């Protein structure tokens, strides 16, 4: 079939995913409905299953199809939250996100949720159960990212702390995959000198073996591009005026799409153009896009090393390039597609609720029209 580029498919995501060609998508960025937290007012919605086991199995069946349509060098990013165990679905403030968003009296398929031997008020550990099942089905879990919400929703509970974070998992199909390294600012070199005697402790540097990194200067890892981005991201949730109750902020999508979706893909072989960085210290080069854990070799003080050349790889097909495709099977209000378009990339969305599709189309329209003009 013709791939529905920059379009939103209305219906159940599992069925629409089966219509897409295998290995046709560069990355997936999504946030599925959380279990037992909200009723979105449509039949056959995910998240209203009576047991969390059924929810996890249905969710991972969907990601089996995502894996099929994902290229071998593709990645999958999933934002998912937890819930507290309770006998019935109520406006229970202990969930952190009370299930009170009913539409036209819609109460879901079953008002009872079963949590087995998990006692009431206990976290169900949905994110971890999901991640383990994904790994059991062949995915490689590369990172667990913490989305820290500095302006989180206040909670009225008195017997626990207010939850101010969610999880974002990075999965890959294979050990090598497309990944453009993302950087963040270092602390100043002055602060670095104050915090350390310039030599890493053996216990810190190499787990106490005293073999690999003994005597290495901490300044060696101070590069002009910044340091490799860490896994705790402080991103404030943003208010959203439309009738959608779970909109993640654009900023949460920006880094994954920059890292996981190439801007240039060969129209013939499908290989992504990778950034090649040449450094002054040893004229060594490296590819930024293979998902490896290796660092660039340095000589002397890395703070003095400057990038002297950056360029993109070329597959040699000479057939031209197009932009990569981001898939979101739970498209909602369209934030994933919006960020993809802003980064000159393409999207495919799948959404069950036709009201949300209208919201997404309204948000995307200016950017789609701009692309047509270009």
Image (cartoon, rainbow, N blue to C red):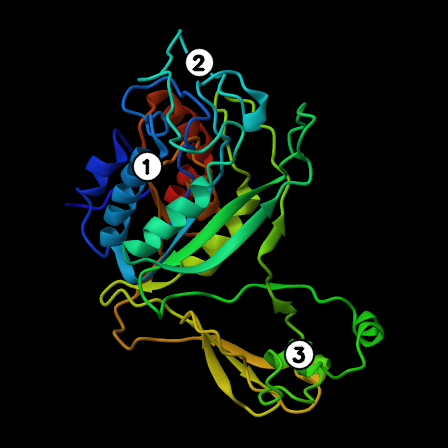
Where in the figure is residue 325, as x and y percent of width and height?
34, 52
Q: Is residue 29 visible?
A: no
Residue at the extreme top of the image, as rendered: 105
The CA distance from mark 3 to mark 1 is 41 Å
User: Which of the 4 quarters of the picture holds residue 156?
Assistant: top right
Judging by the rendered image, the residue that carries numbered circle 3 is 203
Does the CB distance between marks 2 and 3 fall below 8 Å? no
Q: Nearer the viewer, residue 171 or 302?
A: 171
- Above or below, 61 against 312 in this view is above
Would you say 70 lies left or right of 186 here? Answer: left
Judging by the rendered image, the residue that carries numbered circle 2 is 102
User: Which of the 4 quarters of the picture holds residue 174?
Assistant: bottom left
- Above or below, 60 against 219 in this view is above
Where in the figure is residue 80, as x and y percent of width and height?
46, 41
Considering only order in the chain, which callout, 1 or 3, is on the residue closer to the N terminus?
Answer: 1
Considering only order in the chain, which callout, 1 or 2, is on the residue closer to the N terminus?
Answer: 1
The CA distance from mark 2 to mark 1 is 24 Å
Helix, strand or loop at label 3? It is helix
Helix, strand or loop at label 2? It is loop
Considering only order in the chain, which callout, 3 or 2, is on the residue closer to the N terminus?
Answer: 2
The CA distance from mark 2 to mark 3 is 54 Å
Q: Image point 55% across, 63% down: which residue?
A: 182
Judging by the rendered image, the residue that carries numbered circle 1 is 53
Would you say 148 lies left or right of 318 here? Answer: right
Mark 2 crowd level (few <14, some 14–19, many ≥20, 10 Å Cα): few
Which part of the image, by quadrant, shows the N terminus?
Answer: top left
Helix, strand or loop at label 1? It is helix
Q: Nearer the viewer, residue 132 or 101?
A: 132
Where in the figure is residue 72, as x and y percent of width and height?
27, 63
- Above or below, 102 against 287 in this view is above
């Amino acid at each position: 079939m013709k791939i529905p580029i920059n379009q939103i498919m209305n219906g159940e995501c599992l069925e629409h995913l089966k219509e897409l060609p295998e290995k046709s998508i560069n990355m997936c960025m999504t946030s599925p409905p959380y279990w037992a937290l909200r009723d979105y007012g449509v039949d056959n919605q995910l998240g209203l299953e009576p047991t969390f086991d059924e929810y996890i199995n249905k969710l991972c069946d969907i990601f089996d199809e995502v894996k099929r349509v994902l290229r071998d060098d593709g990645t999958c990013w999933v934002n998912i939250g937890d819930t507290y165990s309770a006998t019935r679905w109520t406006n229970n403030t202990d969930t952190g996100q009370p299930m009170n968003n009913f539409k036209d009296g819609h109460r879901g398929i079953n008002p009872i949720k079963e949590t087995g031997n998990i006692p009431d008020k206990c976290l169900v550990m949905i994110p971890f159960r999901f991640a383990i099942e994904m790994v059991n089905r062949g995915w490689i879990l590369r990172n667990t990212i913490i989305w820290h919400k500095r302006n989180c929703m206040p909670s009225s509970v008195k017997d626990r702390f207010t939850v101010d974070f969610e999880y974002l998992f990075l999965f890959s199909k294979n050990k090598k995959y497309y990944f453009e390294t993302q950087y963040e600012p270092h602390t100043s070199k002055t602060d670095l000198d104050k915090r350390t005697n310039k030599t890493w402790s053996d216990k810190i540097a190499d787990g106490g073996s005293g073999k690999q990194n003994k005597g290495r200067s901490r300044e060696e890892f101070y590069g002009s591009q910044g340091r490799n981005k860490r896994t705790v991201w402080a991103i404030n949730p943003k208010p959203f005026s439309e009738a959608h109750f779970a909109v993640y902020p654009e900023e949460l999508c920006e880094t994954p799409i920059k890292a996981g979706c190439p801007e240039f893909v060969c129209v013939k072989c499908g290989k992504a153009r990778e950034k090649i960085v040449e450094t002054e210290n040893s004229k060594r080069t490296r590819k930024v896009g293979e998902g490896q854990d290796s660092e660039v070799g340095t000589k002397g003080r890395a703070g003095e090393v400057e990038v002297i050349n950056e360029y993109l790889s070329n597959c040699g097909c000479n057939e031209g390039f197009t932009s990569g495709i981001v898939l979101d099977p739970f498209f909602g209000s369209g934030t994933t597609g919006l960020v993809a378009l802003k980064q000159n990339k393409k999207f495919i969305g799948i959404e069950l609720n036709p009201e949300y599709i209208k919201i997404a189309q309204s948000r995307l329209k200016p950017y789609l029209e701009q692309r047509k003009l270009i």
